[in-house]
Image: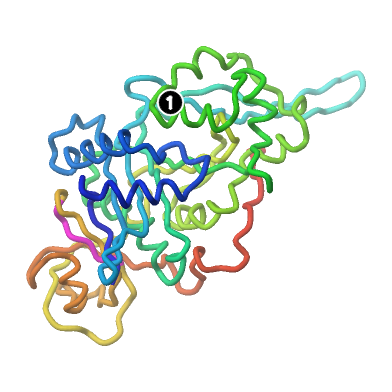
Amino acid sequence: MRVVRNAREDDLGQILALAADIGPGMTTLKPDAAALEARLALAAASFAGTAPPQDADYLFVLEDLEQGRLCGVAAIKAAVGVKEPFYNYRISTSVHTSPTTGLVNRVQSLHLSHDLSGATELCSLYLHPAYRKGVNGKLLSKSRFLFLAQFPELFSQKVFAEMRGFQDADGRSPFWESVGRPFFHMDFHEADDLCGRGDRLFIEHLVPRLPLYTHMLGEPARQAIGRTHVDTAPARRLLEQEGLQFDGYIDIFDGGPVLEAKLPALRAVRESRLHVAGAGARAGGTTCLVATTRRDGFRVVVADVDLDAAVIRPGREALEALGGEPGIPVRALAMQARAGGSDPWTRDDVGVSPRATPG
C-alpha cells in the first residue's frame, strides 16, 4: 500500500536521497541538506497553519508502507514572487506586412514577464524510477489537486507548473546556451542552483528588458522553446488531464513550458465530493483518489469505491493508511476524467512533447 502524506522533518534523509537522484533542471528540489531542512520546517508550519499564508509551502511525500520507504515527493507553493518578482518569458507573435511588396512576416519574440507573481505553483514533483508503474505517478501528482479542492482559500485563483525544459543527449540546454549564457556568463547548472537557493535578483540585473526575437536564435534554441524534458513528459500529461494547459509562458533558463489554469476550473475542484468512510469493502466500483480532510494530517490513497454512495468503503488497508476510523469524512475523486487511456508513467512511448506556441 502506498500513501501520499504530509512531509515530516524526520523525512530529511530520504528526501535528500531522492533530490540527489534527480539531476540538474529541477530548481525547487536541490540536494542541499540545509535548504531541505529549512523547507521541511516551513512545510510543518504551513500544514499547522502557523506560517504566513503567502509563504506557505506544502510538501508531500509518497510512502511505500510495506517497505518503509519514501519513493516520491511533490509540493504546492501557495504564492510565488511575493518578496521578489517571479520571472518567465512570454511568447508573442506579431505580423508585419509590406504593402509595396506584398510580403507578410510573422515574427515571434520573447518578453521578460513577472505576470505569474502571486500565483500558486505546483512544483518539486519527482517519482523514483523503480516506482514508475501502476498508479503511483497518478497518486503522487494528482493528490495535490485534492488538497487544493479541500482548502481553496489557502491558494491563489491562478495555479501553474513549470515543466523542465528540453536537454540534449549530453545534458545541455540548447535554449540556455543561446539565450542564457550570453547574458549570465555562467553554466546552466550554476544559474539553476542560484535560483534553487532563492537568489533571483541576478535575473533582474542581467536579463535585458527588450524583446528577444527568436528568428535571431540558433535552430536548436528555437526548437527548444516550449519543449518538455523527456523525463518530465509523463508529469506534463498528468497535469493536462487535471485542466492545466500551456498558454505562452516559458522558463527563462531552459525554455520549458509553463502550464496554468484557474483554480475553479481544475477537475478536482469541480468533480471531487465529500463522503463518509465506512468499514468493510465493496467489490468493484471506480478507482479513485480518497483523501482525508485534515490540513495537518492530510493523506491520500487509491481505492475502488462507489462514488454514488454517501458512505464509501475503501477497505481496511486503505482506511488504515489514511490513519482514520470508520466514520471519518473523506474527499474522493475518480482517477480518470474519462474511461480509457494509459498511465503516462508506464508508457513506452514517453517522448518529448511537441513544441507549442501561440499563433
Q: Which residue is mark 1?
A: 86
Residue nearest the observer in this picture, 286 or 318: 318
Which element is circle 1 on?
loop
Give x and y (percent) for residue 177.
Answer: 68, 30
User: Left or right of 38: which side holds 85?
Assistant: right
Q: Residue furthest bottom?
A: 283
Residue 208 falls in image quadrant: top right
Q: Residue at x 41, y 39 (%)?
A: 30
Q: Is residue 168 above or below residue 215?
A: below
User: Which residues are the magenta region?
Assistant: 289-294
Residue 182 falls in image quadrant: top right
User: Left or right of 48: which side holds 331?
Assistant: right
Q: Residue at x 65, y 39 (%)?
A: 172
Q: Residue furthest right?
A: 101
Label 1 neighbourhood size at 10 Å, few (<14), some (14-19), many (20+)? some
- Tell me the quadrant of the picture where the C terminus can be found: top right
Give x and y (percent) for residue 23.
Answer: 51, 45
Q: Is residue 50 above or below residue 296?
A: above
Give x and y (percent) for residue 356.
Answer: 64, 44
Give x and y (percent) for residue 209.
Answer: 58, 14
How is this picture coloured?
A: rainbow
- Tell me the quadrant of the picture where the N terminus can be found: bottom left
Our reading of the magenta stretch's main secondary structure is: strand
Q: Amino acid at mark 1?
A: Phe
| Total number of numbered discs in the rendering | 1
Residue nearest the observer in this picture, 335 or 224: 224
User: Left or right of 336: which side holds 315?
Assistant: left
Q: Is residue 308 above or below residue 239?
A: below
Q: Residue at x 44, y 52 (%)?
A: 243
